[in-house]
Image: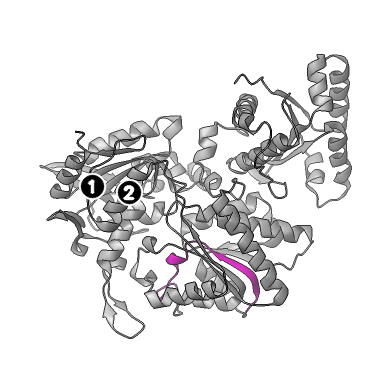
Amino acid sequence: MNITKPIIRKIKDNETALAEFEKEIKTNEAEDTKDIIMNFPTVYIHNWPETNKYDVYVGESNNIFARTRQHYQSRIKHETWQYRMMKTDASLYIIGHEHFNKSLTLEVENRLMHYLMSVDKVHQVHNGRGNPQKHYYPSAEFEEIFRKIWTELHESDEELFPDENIVKDSAIYKASPLHKLTDEQENAKIQILECIDLARQKHEKQIIFIDGEAGTGKTVLNSNIFYELYCQEEEKDNAEFKCCMVVNHDEQVKVYSDIAKKLGITEKYGEVVSKASTFLNRHKDLDSVDVVFIDEAHLLFTQGNQGYSGKNQLDDIIKRAKVVVIVFDENQILRMDQYWEKQMIDRYRNKAIEQQNYITLTKQLRMQADNETLAWIDAFTKKQIINKIPHHDYEIKIFDSPEALDLEIKKKASSEKSRLSRVIANYDWDYKKGKKPEDTSKKYWEVDVWIENQRWHKPWNYELEQNLNKDEKKKIKEQAWAEQAHTIAEVGSTYTIQGFDLNYAGVILGKSVKYRNGKIVYDPSETSNGKVTKNRTMEDGTKQNFAKELLKHEIRVLMTRGVNGLYIYACDDQLREALKKAAEQE
């Protein structure tokens, strides 16, 4: 398919420059260019400097000159983005194409919003909700047309329009509410929005429960509905609306907070994203919040600990909200104080079923893997058996040494297409955040592997940050761990990488994962994670231990991070040999 180049013009963003550009188009441009700019739909990007970054507004119009002058006229209201823009040295990009129609320009507008909100140098995107299109003519041409547009914009300004791979690898891009939803997600969204609307009309308390394994699109669905609700209330000019996002994961709190800032939610409604304890401290009154979304609810504490004095964070949150959307994956529970007894979680799940608010997501969206490969990972992480490793497009590779695995991951990370590749490991080596290693000969907490008197070692995550200067620390402040360039020299833990994607995941399996008598077994005596091994006081007062189950969950989290491939080194000799045998091609 031979797609012509887009027409892109950059001008100063003011009335004088616009009038000069209009005159130029009418008098000096070729007839086909004049026709495309004057008579076809166009897409445009207003951008201006704000706090050492860019603010942007993306739009589409059937008459770019009339539409732009409307924006200029709106500057008289001090609270508008137009007022802020007109006080700066702003630029305007005007984009045309001979195949543009209404649906295609709306699709380009939405993708530009999605990309720009994922760019480090963008402070805020001032649009309302996105508007992704479904089927239209010529939807088959969209990807190539957009690629040509972004490539040309990238050549114009590498800061505002970075390489496409950098955009797509960002944690904000992956959690963005502007993704086009799958049919499964779209149906869930309709059901959830209808439930929330009805509950608010009737003043009825509702629990919505979403079950879904890692990579089934739970975060994007959550993010999408959260943003949609704010857009709806903004249109009603409802400043009293209280909707919060809760997630007990530092990295995910940061991603959701950055999204809320970039979309202007924080500026208008304050801090609406937090961990559970912060939410509970901010909202003391019963039913004081309209809607609460709880992403990764399996991470909530079900017992008191140092940071939480209650009995069950989910119970406490439900008391404070009129509608609660619970997103849950029992295969990602990693700590004893987050362990959910079956009857405990079934209380919420059954209530949602009773209210016809129970949803399951099943389609795997993270891993670009065939069913046979997904079945192999399921067999390893759930059934504790090692089947013959399939050799398809998704690459599963077994290594003889951690050094060889590390070198291969570094090689992948050096390529723009797979730069988000990292070594990760289960918690079988000591690490105490904020404290120095007990062994004074060591500067860092490390993953430390010995093979026949040969030592390979590498710092745990966040250890190398202490070597960065002030400017370097500021630069990485808005990036997730794996997005920070220096972390290629670290090992990520399960807690750091949970909920995030990697291009290639290099997994080091410590000695808590063994292979004996044809089965994978878990040895709690080998883990350094005290939050896994301690006993659990059950609701009936008895004490039980679930360390083996939690270690199994830890391995599943690690082995489902890679979008394009999974590399494995096993410290246990028998496990390593079994994996090598399973990888042999007949």
Residue that carries the numbered disc 1 in the rendered image: 387
Residue that carries the numbered disc 2 in the rendered image: 375
Q: Which residue corresponds to the image point at 32% horizontal and 52% vertical from the top-left?
A: 378
Q: Is residue 444 above or below residue 535?
A: above
Give the camera-side residue of 183 and 518. Answer: 183
Q: Is residue 242 visible?
A: no
**Image quarter of the N terminus:** top right
Give the distance between the C-alpha atoms of the residues marked 1 and 2, in whole angstroms.
9 Å
Position of 78 with respect to 335 (left or right) is right
| Image coordinates for residue 574, horizontal then vertical, percent | 13, 49
Give the camera-side residue of 536 and 353. Answer: 353
| Image coordinates for residue 369, horizontal then vertical, percent | 39, 41
**Image quarter of the C terminus:** top left
Q: Tell me if residue 23 is in the magenta stretch.
A: no
Looking at the rendered structure, the kind of residue marked 2 is Ala
Position of 281 with respect to 386 (left or right) is right
Q: Residue 480 bears which disc, if any?
A: none
Q: Earlier in the sequence, mark 1 or mark 2?
A: 2
Tag 2, which secondary structure?
helix
Contact (Cβ within 8 Å) of mark 1 with mark 2: yes
Snapshot quadrant of residue 206: bottom right
Segment colored magenta = 287-307
| Image coordinates for residue 124, horizontal then vertical, percent | 67, 46
Position of 523 with respect to 268 (left or right) is left
**Residues packed near mark 1 inside 10 Å, few (<14), some (14 to 19) or many (20 plus):** some
Position of 488 with respect to 250 (left or right) is left
Give the camera-side residue of 317 and 356. Answer: 356
Tag 1, which secondary structure?
loop
Looking at the rendered structure, the kind of residue marked 1 is Asn
| Image coordinates for residue 209, horizontal then vertical, percent | 52, 67
Snapshot quadrant of residue 324: bottom right
